Image (tube, rainbow, N blue to C red):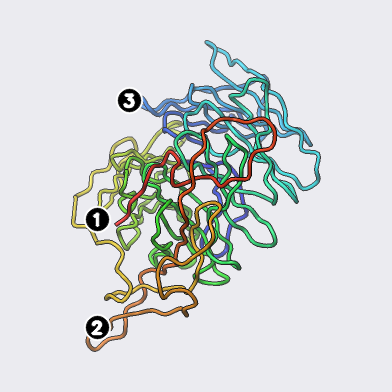
Amino acid sequence: MTVCAVEPPSTSGVVRVPEAGCVITADGSYAARLAPAGDCWFAERWTLDGPEPYAVPLPGNQPEEPGTGVQPMGDGRVLVHRPSAERHLFSLLYPTGPGTGELPLGAVECPEPGSRLVLLPPAPGGARAYALVSGPRSSSVWLVAGGVFGPERLAEVPGRCSGGVWLDGTGRLLALDRELGGRTKTVVLDLERAVVSPLLQIADDSDDRLLLADPDSGLLLISSDAPSPGQERLGWGVLGSTLPVRFPECLRLPDCVVTPFAIQPGQVLMPENCAVGLRVDGAFGTWVGTWRPAERRVRHLPAPEGWLAGAGVWTPEGVLRLPYATRTTPCGVSHLSAARGDAGAAEPGRTGETAEVGRTGGAEEVGSTGAAEEVGSTAGMAEPGSTARAVEPGLAGASVAARTAAPPGGRPPAPMETRVPVTSAPRPTVPPATRTAGPAPARPVPLQQAPLGRLVTN
């Protein structure tokens, strides 16, 4: 998964949504970017699902501005977003023999001062594309490609929204980070019924954001300052699970900004085995990290030369594909293999080979050697429309405490992870996924019966 919205960098170790050098479709078949041509810019489509990657330049009638947004569609066309004062113009570019064809789609007006329009990440299936218009008081989601009559406003959400993560494989459930009342919480928007429900609310006074999600396993990558007030931390949870949200210590890298950008797909019912690609920005530059929830360390790998930083996609077999462009190789893909327990870098264009070694093990239970911290909170990752209740007895109202088993003659080991209790609720009934005329009923989005299916964790 690659995202294309931009947020200011965080100084506390987590980036909201990274700006990628290119955008990749949800299935990894195509990519698109703005390519330089002297002092000009033009759209370029990459084909990634063949034996070798190759690029097709798509110069339009005039050079593109540096702020132009591009996004690949599932059929090989490229959506172009051209901002112009209060109007945002959309078109589809496609190759036509030696030239470039262009299909104008229409425009979205943003007259309200302080409003901002960004393309949302590529939707599953690749047939549609969406944009988010964020205003001071409300935000709206637009269908900008794939509709019948041009751009269409689908829903309006109170509050200023950012981010954008797809929770299912059909493009129906969209998670947004909503700022309302001075706090940021993640909500989920059902595009079929235009209904908004809460998704992630760890504590009343915390800022909680969803960074990435994998529909196959339900693995969620989360940013929150609940375990460490005033400092954001990177954690993980499982959609539909009653286990706590966990914040591993290994993801806290001093003086570095850690940004997850891709999750390994195809790990059904095994979220702890999903490999996660991390972009790490530090004093020595930018490099790649790989991590699995079942392991307690991050593997640091050199990024390929010319990496379009923040862009990449996992294969179900556990190979991380990173697009790069250099003067000698204007279109290339480097492969990094992340076998469980080890990872290694490969030469550009070749799959990295690593030795399979023993796993380092899963998360230790509270009270065991190498203990974890518990955060006394009665809120966590809630189902939409639910009432918060603690699912682990004894944690409600408890103080922060680290239960450690000290080694002989030494100090207790540092906590390996922090856990925040997760809330749950009775499972609601799923209505038919049909569009209705008039106001949508205020019913919760049934995430546990969404196309993700029932999820199990160890």
The residue at 22%/58% (across/down) is 359
Give coordinates of residue 42: x percent, y percent.
Answer: 60, 28
Is label 2 in a helix, a strand or a loop?
loop
In the rendered structure, the answer to whether residue 43 lies left or right of residue 105 reads left
Sequence order check, earlier mark of 2 and 1: 1
Q: Distance between the residues labelled 3 and 2?
A: 53 Å
Q: How far apart are marks 2 and 1 (CA)?
A: 25 Å
Residue 221 or 306: which is nearer the viewer? 221
Q: Residue at x 38, y 79 (%)?
A: 402
Query: Which label was assigned to residue 341?
Result: 1
Closer to us: 407 or 152: 152
Residue 250: image quadrant is bottom left
Residue type highlighted by circle 2:
Pro
The earlier-in-sequence mark between 3 and 1 is 3
Q: Give the side of residue 338 with respect to residue 304, left or right.
A: left
3 and 2 marks in contact (CB < 8 Å): no
Number of callouts in the render? 3
Going by the numbered disc 1, the residue's amino acid type is Gly
Give SS at disc 3: loop
CB contact under 8 Å: marks 2 and 1: no
Look at mark 3 in the image and give the residue it sits on: 51
Instruction: Find numbered disc 1 in the image and state the secondary structure of the residue it sits on.
Output: loop
Q: Residues within 10 Å of mark 2 (few under 14, many from 20)?
A: few
Q: Mark 2 points at which residue?
A: 407
**Labels 2, 1: front one:** 2
Image: 38 above or below 258? above
Calculate the distance from the C-alpha at mark 3 to the C-alpha at mark 1: 29 Å
Query: The disc labelled 3 sits on which kind of residue?
Result: Pro
